[in-house]
Amino acid sequence: MTTPVNVTVTGAAGQIGYALLFRIASGAMLGPDTPVRLRLLEIPQAVKAAEGTAMELDDCAFPLLDGIDIHDDPAAGFAGTNVALLVGARPRGPGMERADLLEANGGIFGPQGRAINAGAADDVRVLVVGNPANTNALIAASNAPDVPKDRFTAMTRLDHNRALSQLARRADVPVSQVRRVTIWGNHSASQYPDVFRADVAGTPGARYADEDKLWLADDFVPTVAKRGAAIIEARGASSAASAANAAIDHVHDWVLGTPEGDWTSAGLWSTGEYGVPEGLVSSFPVTSSGGAWQVVEGLDLDAFSRERIAASVQELSEEREAVRALGLV
Ligand code: NAI
């Protein structure tokens, strides 16, 4: 039998954790031939709830699930881990300023980055889901100097999937016929979902954008960027199943590759692509092969897109300045 892959999930007792763990154990993330060993990392108060989830995982009798360990110590939780899904984060509380939020999350993602640096497997791949995801990924990566920076990623796949679905609806085609949309920038309301370079059942996405500028700026972009808030409003709880699904998609494509002729979106440590300052974790159009992401280069960006990308990247720069001022990176 193949050696099991160690997968650590932080925030395992939370909403996303509950939607995520069963799919990892079923083989949806790493494929039907790869056994997994799950490490659930939680804070001490939530360990009991994580134990309950582990009991349910046992009760599914997943053939690919090699074992489950539960930890409240990052050093143990990340020891030997191959895939780390950093979901647990500190949410913004009432009256909390952005600097307070960044500082609280620095207290989580700094130590987790150091634990990954000290003990994770050499091939470790990290996906940060917990918000503010891009800057939390920056903090974790900055605290893991021995791990290559391209192993730390932030999740914008949910935004990407939302953009695919909204564009398919607008064009009245099945979602499977929409390819090459891109999320640029930050996983926040400033993100820029880009249809200009998309392929919509053989029609260039730019045609929809050019035909109806109002749809683009007043409907599509805000619908995708504010979808999380709309779901909280409707459901009374934040998007958890779709977030878990996006995390599965992200790691699946990272490890097993993106389909020929298509690309997806992920927050990566910039090395200066498209003028994004080096060392910001920003979302780009990406493909994966051989287990590594590559930014899709050479896209010719129109003025509208350039302006929107610059605004979101500016927000990322400001977040980096704030965490630098706090000594977190
Ligand atoms: P939740 O509040 O249901 O669960 C969070 C869990 O994290 C809790 O069980 C908590 O005990 C745990 N936790 C907190 N600090 C921890 C630490 N230091 N180590 C380990 N575990 C810790 O939240 P939910 O709905 O599961 O969301 C998790 C995060 O994902 C939030 O930050 C949310 O904003 C973010 N999110 C990101 C999305 C994206 O597209 N990037 C989409 C949706 C949510």
Image: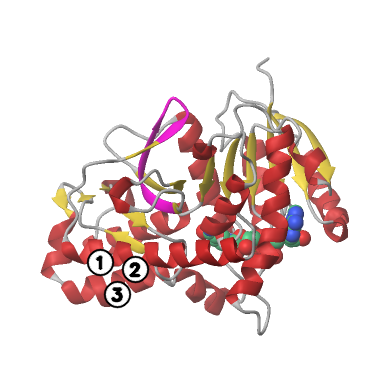
Q: Give the secondary structure at mark 1.
A: helix
In the picture of the structure, the residue carrying the numbered disc 3 is 219
State the image coordinates of residue 144 (x, y, percent, origin top left).
64, 41
Q: In the picture provided, is 92 more to the left or to the right than 273? A: right
Identify the residue at image location x=51%, y=61%. 320
Which mark, residue 311?
2
Q: In the rendered image of this protein, does residue 207 appear above or below residue 271?
A: below
Determine if the magenta segment contains residue 286: yes
Circles 2 and 1 in contact, beta carbons < 8 Å: yes
- Camera-side mark, 1 or 3: 1
Q: Give the secondary structure at mark 2.
A: helix
Circles 1 and 3 in contact, beta carbons < 8 Å: no
Q: In the rendered image of this protein, does residue 147 appear above or below residue 219?
A: above
Crowd around label 3: few <14 · some 14–19 · many ≥20 (10 Å): few
Q: CA distance from mark 2 to mark 1?
A: 6 Å
- Camera-side mark, 3 or 2: 2
Crowd around label 2: few <14 · some 14–19 · many ≥20 (10 Å): some
Q: In the picture provided, is 150 more to the left or to the right than 213? A: right
**Mark 2 belongs to which amino acid?**
Ala
Numbered range of the magenta stretch: 282-293
State the image coordinates of residue 329 (x, y, percent, origin top left).
60, 54
State the image coordinates of residue 158 (x, y, percent, origin top left).
47, 56
Q: In the picture provided, is 262 more to the left or to the right than 242? A: left
Q: In the picture provided, is 318 more to the left or to the right than 107? A: left
Q: Is residue 242 visible?
A: no
Residue 286 found in image quarter: top left
Q: Residue furthest bottom?
A: 95
**Mark 3 belongs to which amino acid?**
Asp
Q: Mark 3: is the Cβ under 8 angstroms from ligand 1?
A: no
Q: CA distance from mark 1 to mark 3?
A: 18 Å
In the picture of the structure, the residue carrying the numbered disc 1 is 307
